[in-house]
Amino acid sequence: MAAEIHSRPQSSRLVLLNKIEGHSDGVNAAVLIPKEDGVITVSEDRTIRVWLKRDSGQYWPSIYHTVSSPCSCMSYHHESRRIFIGQDNGAVVEFLISEDFNKMNHVKTYPAHQNRVSDLIFSLESQWVISTGHDKSISWMSTQSGSMLGRHSFGSWASCLQYDKDTQHAFVGDHSGQITLLKLDEQTCSVITTLKGHEGSVGVLYWDPVQRWLFSGASDHSVIMWDIGGRQGRTLLLQGHHEKVQALRYLPLTRQLVSCSADGGITVWNMETTREEAPQWQESDSCQKCEQPFFWNIKQMWDSKTLGLRQHHCRKCGKAICGKCSSKRSTYPIMGFEFQVRMCDDCYDTIKEEDRTPLATFHEGKHNIGHMDMDPSRGLMVTCGSDRVVKVLISYINCSYYL
């Protein structure tokens, strides 16, 4: 019987298929091999491993290769079977994996950074390997000659990277909470703009080249969607985690965003619905509701013979208010607030019960998630982290689209 194709996913859950163990230190990246029952992992224990699923249903390493320094990140290109490994010593190493995934040959070593490589991307179109590092820089190198083409420095650690191959624009997140957009050329680069919105270090970026949306996750527990293609500076704030966000993936066919945090939380966001931008926080010397002074407003405190109050903000209107005028809490999913946040009394009264209907679903990965990869066509997800465990899950988040 033919599978029914639903207009929306009919279920949203994750089921553990396999648990891969054997690493002696944290696993920094794990990717699913397309069209194969296989996973590639890189670890702090200096190993690169290719795990293939055996007849027993268990994954066993068909390749176990040790390098000179802990492996911090990875970029795998399946069509050419080229794999690039970033290392703690600043080098990027390229290998070629055999067709049967039982052998791996060293191709080149690129002296990309002076410190740990935090993220990297291989671009087949430009034949570049682009990387960011804890030496506060982005570098791009030719995979044909192995030589350095260019480098650009930042004010703090460059922690994550995304690249648009069509326009040769790079997005770099850093530990200060900023995201820098650069245009890369053969020998030089130019800074286009800087995106500011996070209150903590940016840990992960994901770029959707079709919608031209950039997603960022940070240590402030939030996700921000930046509408780059809209050219109007539109941003959407998504708050649905209790810990720092370390992995992101946008699923264009289902218009869902999957985000993972360090405490194992997996949140699936409905990006098909029309959402509202969170307001900018307003500044004032006194409460914009009751007009009582805040504690730094010495003159008004003296004139009114009252003690100053602490300043808060309503998450719905952005007004600066005191605690008494913002005693209520509510969720407001259309603005990205899936957990209860502070509301002024006026805004709280305008929220209807249907406005509190969640626009995200929440799941437990049940281990530290530092990196995640998905294969939507097979409904598979792989997660890994500092607990040395790799989990392969079947994702019923979006399978109905592909049946």
Image: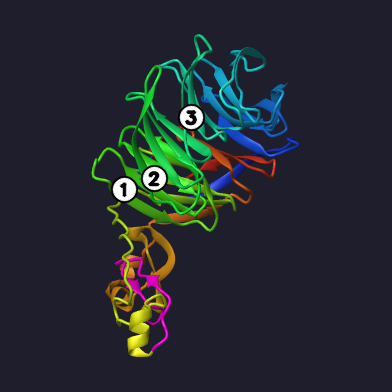
In this rendering, which labeled residue sits more in front, label 2 or label 3? Answer: 3
Q: Position of residue 147 (x, y in %)?
A: 52, 13
Question: Which of these two is toward me, 226 or 104?
Answer: 226
The residue that mark 3 highlights is 138
Q: Are marks 1 and 2 in contact (CB under 8 Å)?
A: yes
Magenta region includes residue 316: yes
User: Above or below — where is 271 with respect to 372?
Assistant: below
Residue ID for mark 1 = 272
The CA distance from mark 1 to mark 3 is 34 Å
Q: Residues within 10 Å of mark 2 (few under 14, many from 20)?
A: some
Q: Secondary structure at mark 3?
A: strand
* Residue placed most toward the observer, 9 or 367: 367
Farthest residue in the bottom direction? 305
Q: Residue at x 38, y 79 (%)?
A: 298
Q: Quadrant of the N terminus?
A: top left
Q: Is residue 57 magenta?
A: no
| Left/right of residue 124 with respect to residue 66 in the rendered view | left
Q: Is residue 357 above or below residue 190?
A: below
Q: Residue at x 39, y 51 (%)?
A: 197
Mark 1–mark 2 Cα distance, whole angstroms, equals 7 Å
**Which residues are the magenta region?**
306-324
Disc 3 marks a residue whose amino acid type is Ile
Sequence-wise first label, 2 or 3: 3
Residue 375 visible in rendering: no
